[in-house]
Image (cartoon, grey):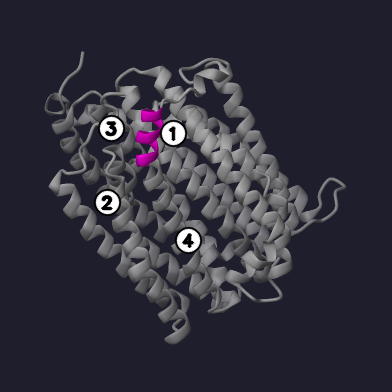
Amino acid sequence: MDRTLNNIRTESLYRKLIRIALPISVQGVISATLGLVDNIMVGALGETALAAVGIALQVFFVHYLILFGFTSGCATFVAQFFGADDEPNIRKTVGFAMTAAMAVGLVFFVAVTVFPEQIIRFYSNDKAIIPDAINYMRIGSITMIFLAITIPFESALKATQQTKIPLVASAIAFSMNTLLNYIFIFGKFGLPEMGVSGAALATVFSRFIEMTIIIMAIRRGNSLKGKLTDYFGWSKDFVKRVMRNARVTTMNELLWSLGQTVYVSAYARIGITAYAAYQAATNINSIFYFAAFSIGDAALILIGQYLGEGKLSESYDLAKKLLKISFVVGILAGLLVLSSLPVLKLYSFTPLGLSYGRKLLMIFAGTMVMNLLNSTLVVGVLRAGGDTFYAMVAECSSVWFIGVPIAFIAALWLQVPIYIAVLMMQLSEIFKLCLLIYRFISKKWIKNVIEGL
């Protein structure tokens, strides 16, 4: 029996949140932890190898976030169709997302295989980094095709509250990635020592395993299973509505991710040691950030379901509770980041690199609450209501009008240490939070985007 939010006890919301967010959180922790292990393995090859992989990963980062942006825009519809119990349109939305993701993947695949050196030189002209970075990009490029299938299915599974399947797929895939990294990087069990190229090859195998597990799970039977034709046959109005939402979230993630890679371009120019420390600290911080970020994913799912059911006023009250939870979770995650300082000793850092890494982690810990609130508001609250244009303006203006200029002023003009540059960058997050809170209070983000479909 449906009940309004005012009649649902806080304990009931917690149970819902745990059921949805916990698997997403565990998936994020597994992915980030095993990514950290990979990072440490590559770091054993030296600061230059670690910096080379970090640079090469930037193009994969941009590709991933473009797909995330598009599927996030589609997930607004999937979550609201789920609330309306409309399975045929859920499958059509997944098919549309997958078609677009494959087109994007092919463009990136060609760019990475044909123009790898030109892409790397955008970030760094250091001759010690370029060869390894090119090898990593070329070998890993095939994963862009795998992700065109994995990400749309994974997004839809989460939006329909089937979060355990992506969790299991990621756990198995990333566990295999760690094992294969050990074998390929260091040349175990009679195989040659491949170094950075081995890390890329391990990623290819793990992404293929992840894709295979998700396809098999869906084929065994759940709400996403259907005939091939069920994923197509979109009407003109359907395409227009989904694209109106998804193209904005895609542009949002594209501009945001490009901004982040421009930051990297600035940080890399401070020096190899500085960037290697930044890469290590970012990987450690990501374990706790991705765990906390599950609140944003859960917010999109829960608020989207309410909006699909036509509960517009209750959606605002639900969002307020979720933001309060985000605040508390952000404090706890920040404390956990501080407790992780000893992990830096696992890297083969110079004393200067170790000092940089510690200071960066302290900055990440202190700003965790603010960054988590921003993520929950953008990815969870505003996108659940289809208010994607405002979310894009708030996020991208903070990056390009404040963040990017600060990054280059700090790195090239003021020539401050890496941790001071990163601290200065937080001004962009403060600006973003002010814009997002204003929009949230206005309630203009509350919309039912599937009405009439």
The residue to which callout 1 is attached is 23
Q: Looking at the picture, which amino acid does disc 1 mark?
A: Pro
Q: Earlier in the sequence, mark 2 or mark 3?
A: 2
**SS class, disc 3:** loop
Residue 2 vs residue 235: left or right?
left
Quadrant in the picture for the N terminus: top left
Q: Which mark is residue 317?
A: none
Image height check: is 229 above or below 74? above
Residue 284 rendering spot, x and y as whole percentages:
50, 57
Tell me the quarter of the picture where residue 368 sits: bottom left
Numbered tag placed on residue 390 in the rendering: 2
Mark-to-mark CA distance, 1 and 4: 29 Å
Give me the residue at 84% from left, 45% from top.
189
Q: CA distance from mark 3 to mark 1?
A: 27 Å
Above/below status of 215 relative to 200: above
Q: Nearer the viewer, mark 3 or mark 1?
A: 3
Circle 4 residues within 10 Å: few <14, some 14–19, many ≥20: many
Amino acid carrying mark 2 in the image: Tyr
Q: Image check: 394 left or right of 208?
A: left
| Residue 449, disc | 3
